[in-house]
Amino acid sequence: GAVVSQHPSWVICKSGTSVKIECRSLDFQATTMFWYRQFPKQSLMLMATSNEGSKATYEQGVEKDKFLINHASLTLSTLTVTSAHPEDSSFYICSALRTGYYNEQFFGPGTRLTVL
Amino acid sequence: AQSVTQPDIHITVSEGASLELRCNYSYGATPYLFWYVQSPGQGLQLLLKYFSGDTLVQGIKGFEAEFKRSQSSFNLRKPSVHWSDAAEYFCAVPRGGSQGNLIFGKGTKLSVKP
């Protein structure tokens, strides 16, 4: 299967700082990537759809100025949590869409963000 | 609107026993259906998927699922559970017409007794 990596796997930061999370598709090109957020013991909630070369599409209720998404190449999307606060602490998971006869989404291993 | 329901929040089975995790969906047409597994602190791994054709789908790790249109269900099964199967299981369907944008169920946590 296709491989998607995320970096870092975990990060601890102080309140008010910004954190960048990278999502890479290692063996295929992905025009579209997705960013999810998962709270403890809950399901994944889609935050935004990242499109290479264009602006991301954010889900209702997600602050686009707080969660900056950049999809600068066909293998890399980044999520920057700006001015992080403790309530932003969560597990962030990205996925990359491999297109073909059947489009299929491949998930990264996730990034655990803790804001102190 | 599309939706996915996993009625069981937490299931405990004994090692070696059979397993069935339930998933019901609401979808306007014939859906694509997915089952993912998530170990603690990890990302999601695809167990199996249904796109079309044979309604009984075989996946990895000995899992299978059956698509039943009449019941709007896609239940996950395994004949003999191993301790390493303890994890969170998510059923998912695409949102709208896009196969990439998924809606997930709330998940079922599986615990395995020795």
Image: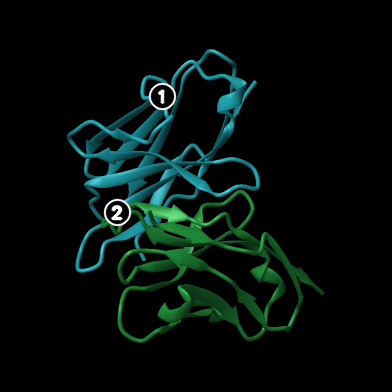
Q: How far apart are marks 1 and 2 (CA)?
A: 23 Å
Q: Name the residue under label 1.
A: A63
Which is more N-terminal, label 2 or label 1? 1
Residue at image position (57%, 54%) is B106
Q: What residue type is labelled 1?
A: Glu
Q: Name the residue under label 2.
A: A97
Q: In this view, does B91 lie above or below B15?
A: above
Residue A17 in the image: state x and y as whole percent: 51, 15
Q: Is residue B75 above or below residue B8?
A: below
Residue at image position (52%, 19%) is A84
Residue at image position (48%, 77%) is B71
Residue A68 in the image: state x and y as whole percent: 36, 25
Confirm whether residue A87 shows in the render: yes
Q: Which chain carries label 1?
A: A
Question: In the visual, does A26 lie left or right of A14?
Answer: left
What chain is colored cyan? A
